Amino acid sequence: MSDPLDLVVPDAEAMEALGARLASVLRAGDLVLLNGELGAGKTTLTRGLGTALGARERVTSPTFVLARTHPTASGVPLVHVDAYRLATAAEVDDLDLDLAGSITVVEWGAGKLDGVVDSWLELDIVRPLGGDPAADDAPRHVRLAPHGPRWEGVAI
């Protein structure tokens, strides 16, 4: 896979299923960046990823702790990071993440991990905005963009 993939994800269940689909191709050393507004579905996607990997505990937002490590059935930990309150790559680096030995998912990571690894997956999740209360249940538009040699020829 070298070209971006555009998807319409109809609901939260489908967002979790997308996470499970990604889990099938992820391995230790993979970095996944999730971008999107509050409520876009970043943690929901990560929950599906964690379930498919056999995470021992339910994946929840790491907003207040910044990073959570979830042991998984495969032995490769899932590290879930919320970089919303971090301003720079140096602050992310201060978390001392084991990028090589884990599957690392970073919410709000755009521009904060530049140059850290040579390959990553980036997902931009867009949800309808505005005052419409039904927008929370509206379909999301997801652009999955692979970066670097790791993703050449990988089908997602």
Image (cartoon, grey):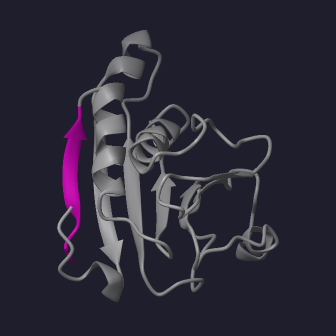
Magenta run includes residue 79: no
Q: Is residue 134 above or below residue 141?
A: above
Relative depth, front residue between 65 and 124: 65
Total numbered labels: 0
Q: Position of residue 3 (x, y in %)?
A: 19, 73
Q: Quadrant of residue 95?
A: bottom right
Q: Quadrant of residue 110?
A: bottom right
Q: Is residue 100 above or below residue 15?
A: below
Quarter of the image with the C terminus in it = bottom left
Q: Position of residue 116 (x, y in %)?
A: 60, 83
State the residue at coordinates (21%, 40%).
Answer: 8
Farthest-out residue, top: 133
Q: Which residues are magenta?
A: 1-9
State the residue at coordinates (17%, 67%).
Answer: 155
Relative depth, front residue between 17 and 88: 17
Quarter of the image with the N terminus in it = bottom left
Relative depth, front residue between 5 and 119: 119
Q: Quadrant of residue 151?
A: bottom left
Q: Position of residue 18 (x, y in %)?
A: 30, 44
Magenta run includes residue 5: yes
State the residue at coordinates (50%, 76%).
Answer: 29
Relative depth, front residue between 154 and 24: 24
9 left or right of 44 in image: left
Q: Position of residue 77 (x, y in %)?
A: 58, 60
